[in-house]
Amino acid sequence: VERAIAELTTSGFLLASDQCKYICIPQFMEHNPVDNITQIDARLKLLVKLPQMLLEDLPGVIPVIERAVAKASDYKGSKQTEELLENARKMLGKCSVESRLENKRNREEENKRNIYKTYVQSDDRTTPWMGEVPRSVGSATGTTPKQIADLFGTMIGLYGAKWTREHGLADRTGQWLDTLRDLHPNQLELGIRRVKREGSDWPPSAPEFRRLCQPKPEEMGLPEMAKAWQEANDHAGSPNHHPWSHRAVYMAGRAAGWHELRSAGSAQECRDVKVKFANAYQALTNRVLSGAPLEDQLSIEHQFDPAIHSNQLVRESMAEQGIDPLDGQGARQKLMGMF
């Protein structure tokens, strides 16, 4: 039923107000004209009973009332008809553009305050999705209830009744806060931009929106996931001697395990190590988006530079052979003497 209503709303046949639980058929009166004043009175009685909030939430109802008033004005009615017309005109008088905008702003602010109060903080026990960032790795600040409230406000603006039918006016179960709790605000902004760009007819679920919040490595100036994975595989045998295309590729390979990358034989082993690499590489990509350094604390291992280490090995090898690495002429004579 909800999907049918949504389709009829999209086609323009219906106007639906999820907040007030009303459905309006704008062309109903054109297809079902009245024949006498009794029918007009009956319709006016129904119209004047409509809540004022409905007219603010669903401005498309206003032309329907205006047509009914214009039609009734053409008839010579009773005193009751005049009273109904007066009440209907008062309703329309409260629906000026300025009044509707002011009421809408006030209502949106009130909704945001209510949404903020309804969040349920819950423990995070959800298993990470394959290839996505583990929940323990992410923003130092995390997503706040206020940010979720703002997100709901944005989505309601984009999808209207479709959003409220799927997810309500507020994340009362805490599902959205729980799913997005570790994301950085920059990731939420990225997800919203992608939702707008994709222009889907139906709003995303919480897991779908989380996936939209994951930046692609190439968007952050890192090698693409496939290229990074290939590089880590190709040089897992000598990671300390390879000039890595980006520090993040080396770090993701180290997190996945150089031994595991080299020794993975079965299909399951390959899948497992690839997921570990993808998780680590995506987490590093997220850190770049959030403006955080790739590493929180630089230990001796973290300060390791393969290029510098390789040069150091060469110098040590020359020293063992009695060659001064700073004396190019002497080094040449020493080498020539070995032949």
Image: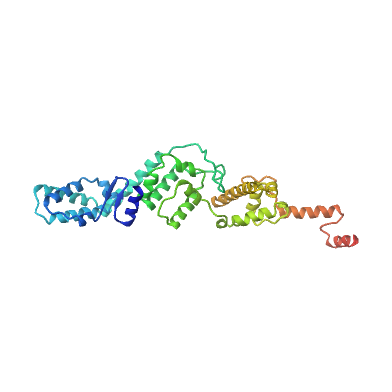
Q: Does residue 285 appear anywhere in the picture?
A: yes
Task: Give 264 or 97, whichever is nearer the viewer.
Answer: 264
309 vs 34, nearest the viewer: 34
Taking the spot 40% from the left edge, 54% from the top edge, the residue there is 201
Counting the numbered discs, the total is 0
Q: Residue 255 location in percent, x, y?
A: 64, 46
**On-image quarter of the C terminus:** bottom right
Viewer-nearest residue: 313 or 273: 273
Horizontal side of 102 relative to 199 (left or right) equals left
Is residue 102 visible to the viewer in this orientation of the structure?
no
Q: Of 113 and 15, which appears nearest the observer?
A: 15
Left/right of residue 188 with respect to residue 300 in the rendered view:
left
Instruction: Name the outermost residue toward the front.
Output: 266
The x and y percentages for residue 295 are 62, 47
Residue visible at 52% across and 40% down?
Answer: 126
- How far across and how far down the image is residue 196, in percent? 43, 56
Residue at image position (62%, 57%) is 227
Residue 223, image x, y percentages:
61, 57
Color encoding of the figure: rainbow
In the displayed structure image, the side of residue 167 where residue 38 appears, left or right:
left
Please indicate whether residue 49 sits to the left or right of residue 233 in the image: left
